[in-house]
Amino acid sequence: MHSLDDVLRKNVEIGYWLSEEHWGKGLMKTAVKETVEWAFQNLDITRVYARVYGNNSSSTALLEKCGFVKEAHIKDSIYKNREFLDELIYAIRK
C-alpha cells in the first residue's frame, strides 16, 4: 500500500502480484478485501485505488469482485515490452 501526501493524502494505492502457481485459488481476493478493510479502519483515508494494465482482464475482474469501480481509462499511457498499453484506474471509496 502506498500513501500520498498533501492534497492527495486521503488516498492510498494498492498493488499486488501473485505467482502463477497460486492463481485461481482466491488468495488475492481475500488479500485485497482484507487490506482494503484494514486501510479504511486504520488510516485516515476515503479512497483506495489501483492502476492496472489495460490488457490484464484477470486483475480488473478481481478488483470488480472486491467492490472497486473503474474511474479512468487512459489510452496508450504505458510502454512495456515495446508496446503501448492502456492504463485503467479502479477505486473503492469508504
Image (cartoon, rainbow, N blue to C red):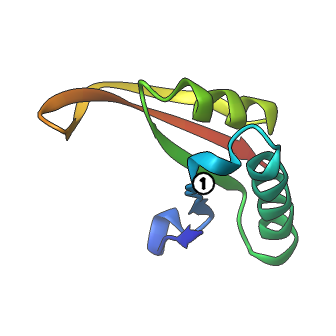
Residue at the farthest front position: 21
Q: In this view, does 35 lie above or below 32?
A: below
Which residue shows up at 84% across the image and 69% down it?
38
**In this picture, residue 5 sits left or right of residue 63:** left
- 13 lies above or below 88: below
Image quadrant containing the N terminus: bottom right
Left or right of 82? Residue 7 is: right
Disc 1 marks a residue whose amino acid type is Leu
Residue at coordinates 55% horizontally, 24% vertically from top-left?
Answer: 57
The x, y position of residue 30, in whole percent, is: 85, 52
Q: Residues within 10 Å of mark 1 (few under 14, many from 20)?
A: few
Locate residue 32: give its quadrant.
bottom right
**What is the x, y in percent for residue 82?**
11, 34
User: Which residue is at the front of the view, 49 or 86?
Assistant: 86
Q: In this view, does 18 lie above or below 26?
A: below
Question: Quadrant of residue 43 in the image?
Answer: bottom right
Q: Where is residue 47 in the image (x, y as percent from the top left)?
A: 68, 53
Residue plotted at (75% across, 37% down): 24
Q: Which of 35 and 18 is in front in this view?
A: 18
**Front position in the image: 17 or 51:** 17
Q: In this view, does 9 lie above or below 34?
A: below
Residue 77's x, y, as percent? 24, 34
Return the residue at label 1: 18
The answer to which of 83 and 23 lies nearer the viewer is 23
